[in-house]
Amino acid sequence: MKTLEQIAAELQGYDPQALSADMVNEFLAGLVQPVHATEDVGLFDALGRVLAEDVISPVNVPPHDNSAMDGFAFRGDELAAGGPLRLRVAGTALAGAAWQGRVGAGECVKIMTGAVMPEGLDTVVPQEFTKQDDAGGDSFASFDAGIVKPGDNRRLRGEDVMQGQAALGKGQRIGPAALGLLASLGISRVRAVRRVRVAYFSTGDEILSVGDAPREGAVYDSNRYTVFGLLTRLGCEVVDLGVVHDDPVLLEATFLQAAERADAIITSGGVSVGEADFTKAMMKKLGDVAFWRIAMRPGRPMAVGRIVSHDPANYGAAVLFGLPGNPVAVMVTFLAFVRPALLRMMGANPEPKVLLRARSAGAIRKKPGRTEYQRGIVSKAADGRLEVAITGNQGSGVLSSMVQANGLIVLHHAQGNVAAGDEVDVMMFEGAV
Ligand code: AMP
Ligand code: MG
């Protein structure tokens, strides 16, 4: 485990007073480590979990060559002669039971979608391309040879997943499709990484809890709720430690409790310059913590490091993410920095950084030398292209504009002013928020 000083020493141009957003992520990648503990979970509990090992398929999916269509199965080499074909129907193959007859030259089998391909047959002509007639007590299917090629409309055994192959890889986050795939292999339990446990609390004397009577100069705590939502969506186990006021004894006890119980701690508030020093002083006292000013907007101040539990029976360190207090800054710093770091702790493969390109509906002022995140609404413009408009008031305390937004416009570090009609990058909320 590297100290903050060691991590910093490896970063070219590290300046805690003017950190680029990219460097924050590099730093955090050095700070956090994947959780090692694993556990067996049943399929329904596996949703959102991260696979601790590859899943090797015990079977072929599909298990047999089968028909992709309702139609008539026949030997593809019958097509070589060209022209119209008229094949005698030797029987019917239904899904769920293999048809056990012999099929001779000039014959076919009526077959349903999903039914096992009868021995020796490799091609299916869809029913709608055929004409059927009866003669002399037999049924016949006729079609033009040009309509299909040998091998058409047949699904091959193992074409989805081959027996013995890794159907899903270690580090895969299990979504609905992966759940279905696991079930298609007949697998009922998987080995998953233990859930990452994250404790969080809000700080500040002016913060009220929901249920408290309103008081002049005080605001209700919203950060605990957004953080709860973000963590839950990510698949973390949450430990809510409430609101902690500027009381050193209480603050210390809460930090220590968090370090004992959780892998990571998220606080909000109390890390900006000019704050009464309670929170920062306590972080310093209880661990290895750096206080940053990040070249970004919103969300400039942030504290990171490790808080060390003093309980000898349960000695551990938790990664600290000390987020700023402003509600929008909390969400932005979570999405930009905490989320990728937690995914790493969860043992998940890094997410591809997919930013959408959309045309900016209006001009946006932007200073080079910092990363700015603006709340945006992406929609399809009249010309069919994607357009993004800013959601009014971009104040870092204005949560309603976060609610209206469906993504964040990311104006990169070196970028300058944006003119109306310029393309910009957007981080969509779908899946993350
Ligand atoms: P701070 O970072 O502590 O200076 O807080 C910046 C702003 O965010 C102040 O206006 C605080 O009142 C507000 N704030 C801090 N914590 C919370 C919270 N948990 N919920 C809502 N607003 C908060
Ligand atoms: Mg404060």
Image: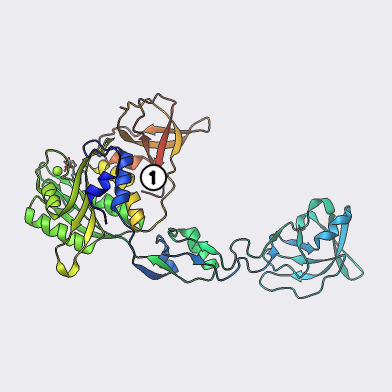
- Give above or below for 342 relative to 47: above
Q: Residue 79 vs residue 2: left or right?
A: right
Query: For the point 16% across and 57% down, which residue is it?
Result: 255
Which quarter of the rendering shows the N terminus?
bottom left
Q: What amino acid is labelled 1 in the image?
A: Phe
At x 37% / y 70%, what residue is drawn? 39
Is residue 321 in sight in this rendering? no
Q: Position of residue 89 (x, y in %)?
A: 83, 67
Q: How is the image coloured?
A: rainbow
Where residue 387 sits, quadrant-wise, is top left
Kindly identify which residue carries mark 1: 429
Which residue corresponds to the image point at 21% horizontal and 54% vertical from the top-left? 306
How many numbered circles does the render carry? 1
Give the quarter of the image for residue 59.
Answer: bottom right
Give the image location of residue 86, x and y in percent. 88, 60
Q: Residue at x 68, y 74 (%)?
A: 97
